[in-house]
Image (cartoon, rainbow, N blue to C red):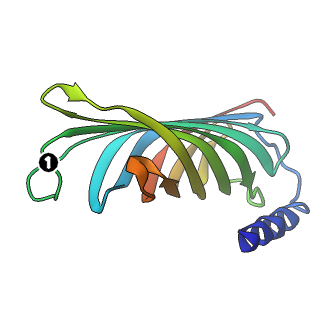
């Protein structure tokens, strides 16, 4: 944890001298997302959607609210019974952007919140909500002053779901709408 805090401090220091440019006040992202879920020793590939809202305080720091939904149906051979699985995340936290190039914006964030998941078998659902944390980042490519493409966003998500630690990978891509200056 101490190493992580040093990395955050170093990155914040590195972006302080970034040259001023027009920073959007609000960025809204929507798109596709993939979750590689750890289901108690068996991996499950889940596909779904992703939406986030970031309010930028200045050209390098903002706050993000992130929401996503993932869906899958297990099949024989996965090590899991034949069930429907869905998971939804609601995460919040700081985002650090590196705006040195006006057409390319890499960023990183630490998001904390929850994961609500359920698995259904024969119409019986067992939903549960638990803590979740996501660590990662990505990059946007500017298309227009008010539009960018989120080419890639990748995170490591950890949850203590099903009474055991689960290590998950989430990948996303989509469109970013930018408002205000």
Q: Position of residue 31 (x, y in %)?
A: 45, 39
Residue lying furthest bottom in this view?
3
**Residue found 27% across the figure and 54% down from its top:** 44
Q: Which of 109/31 is in front?
A: 109
Q: Position of residue 98 (x, y in %)?
A: 75, 58
Q: Quadrant of residue 166?
A: bottom left
Tell me if 98 is positioned left or right of 110 in this view. Answer: right
Residue lying furthest right in this view?
17
If the image is split into quadrants, where does the C terminus sit? top right
Tell me if 7 is positioned left or right of 135 in this view. Answer: right
Instruction: Tell me if I can see residue 104 in this picture.
Output: no
Tell me if 70 is positioned left or right of 93 in this view. Answer: left
**Which element carries disc 1, helix, strand or loop?**
loop
Instruction: Tell me if I can see residue 117 in this picture.
Output: yes
Q: Position of residue 27 (x, y in %)?
A: 66, 36
Q: Position of residue 173 (x, y in %)?
A: 46, 48
Residue lying furthest front in this view?
163
Measured along the vertical axis of the image, is residue 162 above or below residue 13?
above
**Residue found 32% across the figure and 37% down from its top:** 86
**Residue found 35% across the figure and 31% down from its top:** 127
């Amino acid at each position: 944890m101490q190493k992580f805090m040093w990395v955050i401090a170093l990155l914040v220091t590195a972006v302080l001298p970034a040259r001023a440019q027009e920073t959007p006040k609000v960025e809204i992202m929507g798109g596709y997302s993939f979750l590689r879920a750890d289901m108690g020793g068996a991996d499950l590939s889940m596909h779904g959607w992703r939406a986030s809202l970031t309010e930028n305080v200045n050209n390098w720091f903002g706050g993000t609210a992130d929401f996503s939904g993932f869906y899958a149906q297990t099949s024989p051979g996965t090590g899991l019974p034949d069930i429907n699985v869905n998971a939804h995340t609601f995460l919040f936290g700081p985002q650090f952007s590196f705006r040195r190039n006006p057409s390319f914006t890499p960023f990183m964030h630490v998001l904390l919140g929850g994961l609500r998941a359920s698995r259904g078998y024969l119409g019986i659902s067992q939903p549960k909500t638990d803590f979740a944390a996501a660590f990662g980042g990505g990059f946007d490519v500017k298309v227009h002053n008010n539009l960018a493409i989120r080419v890639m966003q990748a995170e490591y998500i950890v949850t203590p779901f099903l009474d055991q630690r689960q290590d998950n990978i989430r990948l996303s891509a989509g469109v970013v709408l930018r408002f205000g200056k």
